């Protein structure tokens, strides 16, 4: 549970437009306080998801569903309301720090144009930021491994710029993480590494992928050998990924041990995919990374600004 868990009323104050932007979902058009989106829950050409920014509520005209940001987070991540509140409390739903201004807003008397409330990637470079590397070390991932698979991504929302660890998807979008932020840039998609036709390891996110690659657990080492990797980047892409799983000779699932993970497994089973459920390996933990951190306890040394620190997890 998050140490700073929000109440439901506090979570409902998070702007839905910002939350969607951090998930890589951006409006196609807007008028006054109404923002229209292509639904992230299905393929469509005409936007049917409306957000009222004044009331901070949403309504999906395609299904008749709607509600607060908590309802939207639960639907987007296929979890219950309490689990959605956990996600929002962990920072996945709000911008809470200013890591450097891109440009100053206009002064009083100058022409003012409101900065668009959307996430835009400003720069991509090699990952060297000590704070980001320290964060990944805290998740049990070595500097060499994270640098081999990730980049340092600077993104902008409005007049503010932020730095994150970025993991690229197959459509050119980025999964973005740092110690307080969890989001993505557009377009959002899956990531596919290696061959998907033999053994295919299916993971929810890239930190699980890096945990699998870092692990010294003999069973995990055996599973990952000569395997391809499908990183969903969102459980909303389970249905989209079914043809890849159906094509593979062997599928190994690394879903989280929660309601959303169980629902994803049920969907995959209903669609005739036979798989090995690797979550049994980390059954006492929320996910593969929690298991990795609890069992590996790596002694990694990382340079922080002005000093060296040895981190025993």
Image: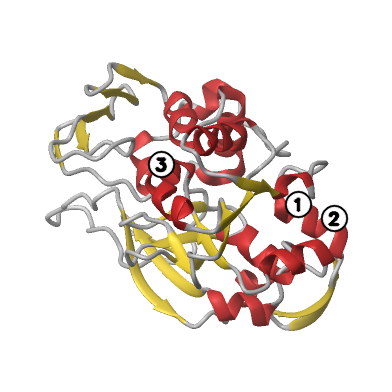
Q: Which residue bears the numbered disc 3?
A: 239
Residue 293 higher or lower than 287, as above or below: below
Q: Are marks 1 and 2 in contact (CB under 8 Å)?
A: yes
Indicate which disc residue 108 carries: none
Q: Are marks 3 and 1 in contact (CB under 8 Å)?
A: no
Q: Please provide percent x and percent y for residue 217.
A: 83, 65
Q: Residue at x 67, y 49 (%)?
A: 276
Report the label total: 3
Q: Which residue bears the numbered disc 2?
A: 294
Asked which secondary structure carries label 3, the reply is helix
Asked which secondary structure carries label 2, the reply is helix
Q: Nearer the viewer, mark 3 or mark 1?
A: 3
Quadrant for residue 172, please give it.
bottom left
Asked which secondary structure carries label 1, the reply is helix
Residue 252 higher or lower than 259, as above or below: below
Q: Which residue bears the numbered disc 1?
A: 290
Q: Residue at x 48, y 65 (%)?
A: 197
Question: From mark 3 to mark 1, how far is it between C-alphas?
Answer: 26 Å
Quarter containing the C terminus? bottom right
Which colour assignment does the render follow?
A: secondary structure
152 or 197, nearer to the observer: 197
């Amino acid at each position: 549970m998050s140490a700073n868990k929000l109440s439901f009323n506090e979570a409902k104050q998070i702007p839905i437009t910002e939350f969607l932007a951090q998930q890589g979902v951006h409006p196609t058009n807007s008028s006054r306080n109404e923002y229209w989106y292509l639904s992230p829950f299905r393929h469509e050409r005409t936007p049917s998801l409306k957000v009222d920014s004044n009331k901070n509520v949403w309504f999906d005209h395609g299904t008749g569903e709607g509600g607060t940001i908590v309802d939207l987070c639960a639907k987007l991540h296929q979890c219950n309301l309490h689990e959605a509140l956990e996600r929002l409390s962990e920072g996945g739903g709000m911008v809470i720090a200013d890591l450097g201004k891109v440009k100053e807003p206009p002064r009083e008397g100058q022409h003012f144009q409101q900065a668009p409330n959307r996430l835009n990637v400003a720069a991509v470079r090699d990952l060297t930021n000590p704070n980001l590397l320290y964060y990944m070390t805290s998740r049990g991932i070595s500097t060499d491994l994270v640098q081999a698979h990730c980049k340092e991504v600077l993104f902008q929302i409005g007049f503010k710029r932020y730095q994150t660890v970025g993991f690229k998807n197959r459509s050119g979008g980025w999964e973005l993480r740092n110690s307080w932020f969890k989001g993505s840039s557009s377009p959002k998609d899956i990531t596919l590494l290696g061959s998907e036709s033999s053994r295919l390891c299916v993971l929810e996110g890239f930190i699980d992928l890096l945990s699998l690659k870092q692990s010294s657990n003999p069973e995990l080492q055996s599973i990952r050998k000569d395997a391809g990797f499908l990183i969903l980047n969102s459980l909303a892409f389970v249905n989209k990924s079914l043809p890849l799983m159906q094509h593979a000779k062997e599928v190994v699932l690394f879903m989280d041990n929660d309601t959303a993970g169980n629902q994803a497994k049920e969907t995959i089973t209903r669609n005739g995919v036979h798989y090995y459920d690797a979550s049994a390996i980390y059954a006492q933990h929320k996910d593969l990374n929690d298991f990795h951190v609890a069992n590996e306890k790596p002694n990694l040394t990382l340079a922080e600004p002005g000093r060296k620190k040895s981190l025993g997890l």
